[in-house]
Amino acid sequence: MAAQKDLWDAIVIGAGIQGCFTAYHLAKHRKRILLLEQFFLPHSRGSSHGQSRIIRKAYLEDFYTRMMHECYQIWAQLEHEAGTQLHRQTGLLLLGMKENQELKTIQANLSRQRVEHQCLSSEELKQRFPNIRLPRGEVGLLDNSGGVIYAYKALRALQDAIRQLGGIVRDGEKVVEINPGLLVTVKTTSRSYQAKSLVITAGPWTNQLLRPLGIELPLQTLRINVCYWREMVPGSYGVSQAFPCFLWLGLCPHHIYGLPTGEYPGLMKVSYHHGNHADPEERDCPTARTDIGDVQILSSFVRDHLPDLKPEPAVIESCMYTNTPDEQFILDRHPKYDNIIIGAGFSGHGFKLAPVVGKILYELSMKLTPSYDLAPFRISRFPSLGKAHL
């Protein structure tokens, strides 16, 4: 057995937003915590980089809306501790046809959970947001709590907080081997560590770590083109004009979303909530940028619906999604090793929920009763993962 000084209460693999919040909660509860990251920080190879993400309570699934109530509280707590603004309330505008079932379900969920919102007719939308074109007579649902999380600032604030609470963050250390047991041994490119529990939040690299442990999750890794479009009149889609974040439903197989200008002067982020299959090890290779069908969809969308933007992207960046078949998260123990915890499959909508996800992963790693019903997030919901996979 390792000497006590080398023994960690928990090791977290992956310093994206989920891993950072897990380490934050562990450190807050005075646990001896080691956070490992394969790349040198900060980096843009995973899913948590960039300057902004949408935050909202508007969800189809009531369990996410319930989780978001506490997420807002923890985001505000982190903002207070960091002494810097991490969130800006802009509202989130959902747009779709009146008969759109998703829109109806979300509105019912918001009403049931008493989230402040407004239903806007097509005429009301035209008066309030004249630079949105509604060719099919779409209606709107405004989630007043919605807004922007400043992603890069939030990650940096979390990593600083973990260190201040006594946690250790080691970047540039890739995990090369995990040996399960009463104590889990984690070998990296630099050295070996031992811990009472292990939390894996490795995004697109999750299955690479899990295969040697006898399990492969149904995760699909996608490269997303994150596109920015130039305003013809600077500020016309800006926060100063009270322009909200938006989510457009029912136009395409996947949602189109946008955030008011801010990241780049005069550029608005408008992207497609889907992308192309990608190997995370090759995300930066030149051949990785050849499939731009989603950019063509967006160009048509911008031309038809956002007339004050130029319909060609001014900047294209990339981000990785790790999707599950049902686009719900995986928050569970390894089926064979109960001190190995898995947080995966955040499917492009996990950033805002990370405060509570991190809390749940902390609870699982310390064998505490989870604060939320984890039935929607269990590995066992995928029937293809039978005993043959273990």
Image (spheres, helix red, strand yellow):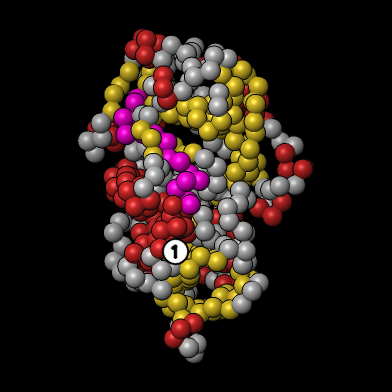
Q: Residues within 10 Å of mark 1 (few under 14, many from 20)?
A: some
| Residue 85 horizontal side relative to residue 116, left or right | right
Q: Could you say which is closer to the camera, residue 92 or residue 168?
A: 168
Q: What residue lies at 34% left-to-right and 64% top-to-bottom? A: 28
What residue lies at 77% left-to-right and 43% top-to-bottom?
Answer: 286
Is 66 situated above or below 291? Answer: below
Is residue 389 visible in this depiction of the protein? no
Any part of residue 227 in sight: yes
Q: With respect to residue 164, does 322 lie above or below? A: above
Residue range (magenta) = 141-156
Left-right relation of 156 to 76: right
Q: Quadrant of residue 23?
A: bottom left
Q: Residue at point 41% right, 19% down?
A: 241
152 falls in the magenta region: yes
Q: Nearer the viewer, residue 348 or 128?
A: 128
Q: Position of residue 200 (x, y in %)?
A: 50, 64
Q: Position of residue 178 (x, y in %)?
A: 57, 75
Identify the secondary structure beneath mark 1.
Answer: helix
Kindly identify which residue carries mark 1. Answer: 163
